[in-house]
Every structure is written in structure tokens, then in C-alpha cells.
């Protein structure tokens, strides 16, 4: 485990205590720098598509999936009839995450099927008003898969199931409990739906043994209706994250923002301030990549330099961990390693 303030993976993110207060002057300098860069339209910070088909910049190239671990994880997923967000959402990091060395290969399991009841304009996952029934064996199969892979940190995510009376909350909670029963030392992160703002359902998942409660805002408040399904909402998502922190104060709360969909500097700053006001611990930034022509277009390709600036600002604001980069996704494996260190650090203090 790394010492406090020293990163396990410095190229991806750094940890800071949520209680540390950054000097106001330093934060103001960072804000001013980003504002000046945005107003000047610096070419090294943003590559605008201007409605045209623009080739992806060099920094968005990802390795082709391969390797023994990649094949092993893929075989297990198929045999146990599981879905992964890595495949369903066309994640660019699948080759890196699934192809890692023994003990580091990771996959984000997507539970409750591969079909969502919502139709967000950025998402590649299939949609339907009435997806197939839940698989009652899935909580057991997921626990079996993670046991076979020998992981000590796992990320779950799920489709939205607005068609179910409990929106799938009991199924998610059962999966987490099975994971913990099978592997008591396993750390579990879950990227959850918003449950249409039903805080009792949020509690049901948060109190099932979860270590990291993640729920994505996806974008800034001004662009919510353009980017997300009409049943989602900025304040609704903030309420979900706030409640999760309230009922599991020793756990971590986490959210993710896509950049390149038309947001401004002021939009992002307002979003970060809203997240800090409810004590969200972790934020990640990544580039939106259009899955197909049926999805909303990319407004701009944000450069690595801009991501580095946003990481610096978020850290100065007091987030405990920040991952920021063109190919970073909410369940990116580097984040898993660092959050594992944070959780173990917190647990050792309580012991």
C-alpha cells in the first residue's frame, strides 16, 4: 500500500485527504488558467469537430485485445452467461484491463442483463421497454466468476430496470451479499442506477456490504436532457450520491463525467463544486467517444493537457481520488487499485 499522498499510479491519479483544505490562492490560479485557455480557444487544449467527421487524435488509440488473461476472462464470462460493460459499452480499455498480469486483470461485470430500459444518447448498451426477466442464478454465478479470477477488488455495474417494481435493487444487493459471503475480504464497487430517486432503494444497495457506491452524473447540469434519458436528472443524481454517503459514511462515493459533449469551463467548475458540497470522494473525467452514427456526435476532443488541468483542480478542491484522461472510464482498472489502497488505509485506521 502506498503512503498517504503518494500515488500507486501517478500517471492516472493522486490521493488527497478529503479533510485537507487547498490554499484558496492556488485554486484560484488554476481556475484562472483554465478560463484563459478556454476563452483563447487554445489548439493544444481542444480539438473541435465542428460537425465534421474528424479522425480520432493519436492519444485516443488503444491496444488491440489479446493475451492469456484476456482469453481466460472472456471464456469465464461466456461459460457463466455473464455480461460485462467492457464489451457491451465498447470500452476502449478492454485490451489493457482484461490483458493485465496475473492478479491485476480486471473486468466490470454488468448485472441484470444486457438490455436497459433507458435510452441515453451516448450509450451503446441495447434498450427495450421490457427486457428479459432477471436471471435468478446470476448473483451466484457472479460470485463464482470472481472467485475463479482470484480478484480482491471487483466492479459491478448494471442496466436500468424501470420495468421492475424495485428497479432491480434487491437483485443488486443479493449479488453484493453473495460476493462478500464467498470472499469476505473482497472489496466491492458498484456503479448503480438512480432508482428514479427512490432513496429507500438506494439504501438497500448501499447497506448490502458495498465498499464504493458509484453513480454517474455523466455530464454537466446544462446538458443533462441532451445526453441522458429523460428519467435521469442532475439533482436526482446528486440526491442519490448524497444519500449513499449518509447511510454508508465509511464507504466511498464516486461519480464520472464525460468531456467533449459541449460543456464549458464554468459548467465543469459548477459541477465539481456541487459534488464537493455533498462530500463525494472520487471523480473521474474521460473523453466521450461516439459508439455509432445513431448516437450524439462528439463536440470536441479534449487533449491530455486539459485533462491534467482538470485533475489538478479537482485534487485542489479536496476530492480523495481523481482519475482524468482521454481513455479513463468510471471503472478503469487504475482507479480500482487506488481505491483499494484508500479503503484499506481507512480500515487500518479503524482497527
Image (spheres, rainbow, N blue to C red):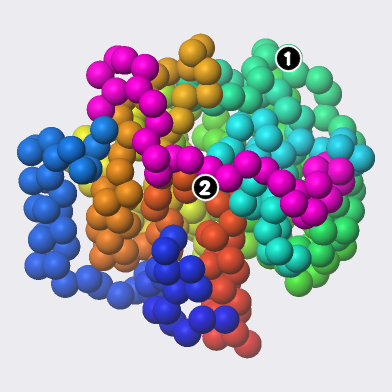
x, y (%) of residue 96?
A: 61, 51
Residue topped by disc 2: 330
Residue drawn where x is 47% and y is 24% of the image: 290
Above or below 147: residue 296: above
Above or below 124: residue 200: below
Q: Nearer the viewer, residue 102 or 223?
A: 102
Total tally of numbered discs in the picture: 2
Q: Secondary structure at mark 1?
A: loop
Side of 233 where 119 appears, left or right: right
Q: Which mark is residue 25?
A: none
Splitting the image into 4 quarters, where does residue 187 fall? bottom right
Q: Is residue 234 visible?
A: no
Residue drawn where x is 58% and y is 45% of the image: 63
x, y (%) of residue 115?
A: 71, 23
Between the residue at mark 1 and the residue at mark 2, the CA separation in whole angstroms equals 27 Å
Above or below 351: residue 255: above
Q: Is residue 218 visible?
A: yes
Residue drawn where x is 80% and y is 43% of the image: 74
Side of 351 where 231 appears, left or right: left
Residue drawn where x is 16% and y is 49% of the image: 34
User: What span is colored magenta in the figure?
Assistant: 48-77
Q: Which mark is residue 130?
A: 1
Q: Callout 1: few (<14), some (14-19), or many (20+) C-alpha neighbours within 10 Å?
A: few
Q: Callout 2: few (<14), some (14-19), or many (20+) C-alpha neighbours within 10 Å?
A: many
Tell whether position 252 is magenta.
Answer: no
Q: Nearer the viewer, residue 68 or 112?
A: 68
Q: Quadrant of the N terminus?
A: bottom right
Above or below 63: residue 227: above
Amino acid at each position: 500500500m502506498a503512503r498517504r499522498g503518494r500515488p500507486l499510479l501517478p500517471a492516472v491519479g493522486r490521493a488527497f485527504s478529503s479533510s485537507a483544505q487547498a490554499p484558496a490562492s492556488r485554486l484560484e490560479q488554476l481556475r484562472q488558467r483554465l478560463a484563459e485557455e478556454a476563452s483563447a480557444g487554445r489548439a493544444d487544449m481542444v480539438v473541435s469537430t465542428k460537425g465534421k467527421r474528424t479522425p480520432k487524435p493519436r492519444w485516443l488509440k488503444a491496444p488491440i485485445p489479446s493475451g492469456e488473461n484476456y482469453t481466460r476472462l472472456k471464456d469465464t464470462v461466456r461459460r457463466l452467461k455473464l455480461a460485462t460493460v467492457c464489451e457491451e459499452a465498447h470500452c476502449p480499455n478492454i485490451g489493457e484491463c482484461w490483458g493485465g498480469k496475473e492478479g491485476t486483470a480486471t473486468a466490470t461485470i454488468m448485472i441484470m442483463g444486457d438490455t436497459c430500459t433507458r435510452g441515453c444518447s451516448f450509450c451503446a448498451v441495447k434498450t427495450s421497454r421490457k427486457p428479459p426477466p432477471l436471471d435468478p442464478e446470476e448473483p451466484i454465478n457472479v460470485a463464482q466468476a470472481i472467485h475463479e479470477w482470484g480478484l480482491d477488488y471487483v466492479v459491478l455495474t448494471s442496466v436500468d430496470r424501470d420495468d421492475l417494481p424495485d428497479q432491480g435493487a434487491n437483485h443488486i444487493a443479493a449479488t453484493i451479499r453473495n460476493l462478500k459471503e464467498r470472499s469476505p475480504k473482497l472489496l466491492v464497487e458498484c456503479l448503480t442506477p438512480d432508482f428514479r430517486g427512490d432513496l429507500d432503494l438506494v439504501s438497500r444497495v448501499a447497506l448490502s456490504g458495498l465498499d464504493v457506491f458509484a453513480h454517474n452524473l455523466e455530464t454537466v447540469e446544462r446538458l443533462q436532457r441532451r445526453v441522458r434519458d429523460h428519467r435521469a436528472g442532475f439533482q436526482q443524481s446528486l440526491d442519490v450520491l448524497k444519500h449513499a454517503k449518509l447511510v454508508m459514511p465509511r464507504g466511498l462515493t464516486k461519480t464520472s463525467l464525460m468531456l467533449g459533449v459541449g460543456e464549458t469551463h464554468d459548467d465543469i467548475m459548477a459541477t465539481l463544486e456541487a459534488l464537493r458540497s455533498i462530500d463525494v470522494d472520487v471523480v473521474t473525467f474521460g473523453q466521450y467517444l461516439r459508439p455509432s452514427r445513431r448516437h450524439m456526435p462528439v463536440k470536441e476532443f479534449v487533449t491530455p493537457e486539459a485533462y491534467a488541468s482538470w485533475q489538478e483542480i479537482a485534487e485542489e478542491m479536496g476530492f480523495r481520488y481523481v482519475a482524468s484522461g482521454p481513455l479513463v472510464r468510471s471503472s478503469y482498472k487504475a482507479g480500482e487499485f487506488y481505491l483499494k489502497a484508500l479503503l484499506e488505509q481507512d480500515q487500518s485506521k479503524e482497527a
